[in-house]
Image (tube, helix red, strand yellow):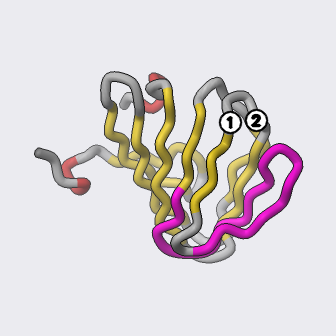
Amino acid sequence: MLHIESLKSKEVFPGFTGRFLHGEKSTTAFWDVKKGSSVPMHQHVHEQVTYIVEGDLEMTIGGEKMLLTAGAMHVIPSNTPHTATAKTDCKIIDVFVPVREDYRF
């Protein structure tokens, strides 16, 4: 058994601090995001499921702009361009398949 606080935290992008749990086939990221922080447009081979625990996150996914609020979820298919900007402080959970080797710290 693990507790989220036992996972090492790392600021991956300015204002995006994550804790990462790696399974055999997936990575779960627990993000604390500061208002106004953003991730530039990018894409990756991983399918990504994003769940907003707290706050408002504006995302553009595959050219579609949307505001995700607490309780919202979205599936981002593999290799789909996307970006995100925190409109408020946020807590976000992302699940990536396959494992995000680049998030092993």
| 78 w.r.t. 17: above or below | above
Q: Which residues are magenta?
A: 51-69
Residue at image mark 1:
77
Q: Main secondary structure of the magenta part?
A: strand
Circle 2 crowding by C-alpha within 10 Å: few under 14, some 14–19, many from 20: some
Q: Contact (CB < 8 A) between labels 1 and 2?
A: yes
Residue 80 - label: 2
Give the answer, above or below, for where 26 lies relative to 84.
above
Who's the residue at 61% across and 73% down the image? Answer: 69
64 magenta-colored: yes
Residue type at the position of mark 2 = Thr
Where residue 78 appears, as percent x and y from the top left, is 67, 30
Looking at the picture, tell me which residue is in the foreground, 82 or 73. Answer: 73
- Disc 1 element: loop
Q: Quadrant of the N terminus?
A: top left
Q: Is residue 66 left or right of residue 95?
A: right
Residue 86 horizontal/vertical position (percent): 65, 67
Q: Residue at x 75, y 45 (%)?
A: 82
Q: Quadrant of the C terminus?
A: top left
